Image (cartoon, rainbow, N blue to C red):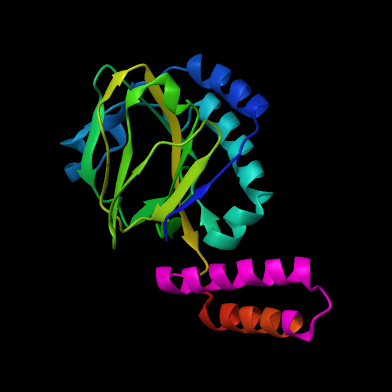
Amino acid sequence: MLLAIPDVLTPAQVTEARAILEAADWVDGKATAGHQGARVKDNMQLPVDSPAAKQVGQLILKALGANPLFMSAALPLHILPPMFNRYSGGQTFGNHVDGSIRTIPGTGHRLRTDLSCTLFFAGPEEYDGGELIIEDTYGSKSVKLPAGSMILYPSTSLHQVTPVTRGTRLCSFFWLQSMIRDDGQRRLLFDLDVAIQRLGTEMATHPSTVQLTGVYHNLLRQWAEM
């Protein structure tokens, strides 16, 4: 499932975060790439222990925890601390697939990367190129969202960032392990949850609303990995 989540951060939060990020010290993004990724990766990145990365990362995680669309779609179990990258002057990241297992910095804990997240800090009018191209079952999807919005997609997807030929593309990227390993099952639960919420708004006291809520939780109980 590929899902755009609008307005994860408010305009004021985007402005605050950008001021912090633009004042930070950036390094070559190849430093954190795997063997395959390093051959096609050309960008700048904040070190994982950067105070700026930690500060803005906490802002993002707090906002996501209060975002019902994200929680419903992702059903997160563990979220890797957000990382940050920057593209300009023709920089790009060629076709690649994200690594399947990542270690949470500073801990011995590892997580399975079920879902990848890209949160945009620069609006599409601020730069040319820089589209996130994601290959899915129905072909290629080109993603370039407003500042403060985020794309959520399966980490199994082949994807790339096209060259940025004008301006600067500034984003956060990170991964999460969902309570539901299977993407198809996550999609079914998301569709069911959306329908239940709509019923709850239109027919809150209808017996079917309670019945379908029970079905949702029983499926979640059956499929969830904790």
Is residue 186 found inside the magenta-colored segment of the image? yes
- Of all residues, the one furthest to the front in this rendering is 202
| Nearer the observer, 224 or 217 | 217
Relative vertical location of residue 198 with respect to residue 208 in this rendering, above or below: above
Residue that appears at 18% across and 43% down: 35
Residue that appears at 30% across and 55% down: 157
Is residue 173 found inside the magenta-colored segment of the image? no
Left or right of 210? Residue 83 is left
Q: Quadrant of residue 210?
A: bottom right
Give the quarter of the figure containing the N terminus.
Answer: bottom left
Residue 182 seen from this side: no
Chief secondary structure of the magenta portion: helix
In the rendering, at what x and y percent does residue 168 appear? 38, 20
Residue that appears at 46% across and 51% down: 152
In the rendering, at what x and y percent does residue 55 appear? 60, 30
Give the quarter of the figure containing the C terminus.
Answer: bottom right
Span colored in magenta: 181-209
| Nearer the observer, 198 or 61 | 198
Looking at the rendered structure, the number of numbered marks drawn on it comes to: 0
Residue 185 seen from this side: yes
Left or right of 5? Residue 174 is left
Left or right of 143? Residue 17 is right
- Of all residues, the one furthest to the right in this rendering is 205
In the rendering, at what x and y percent does residue 9 appear? 62, 36
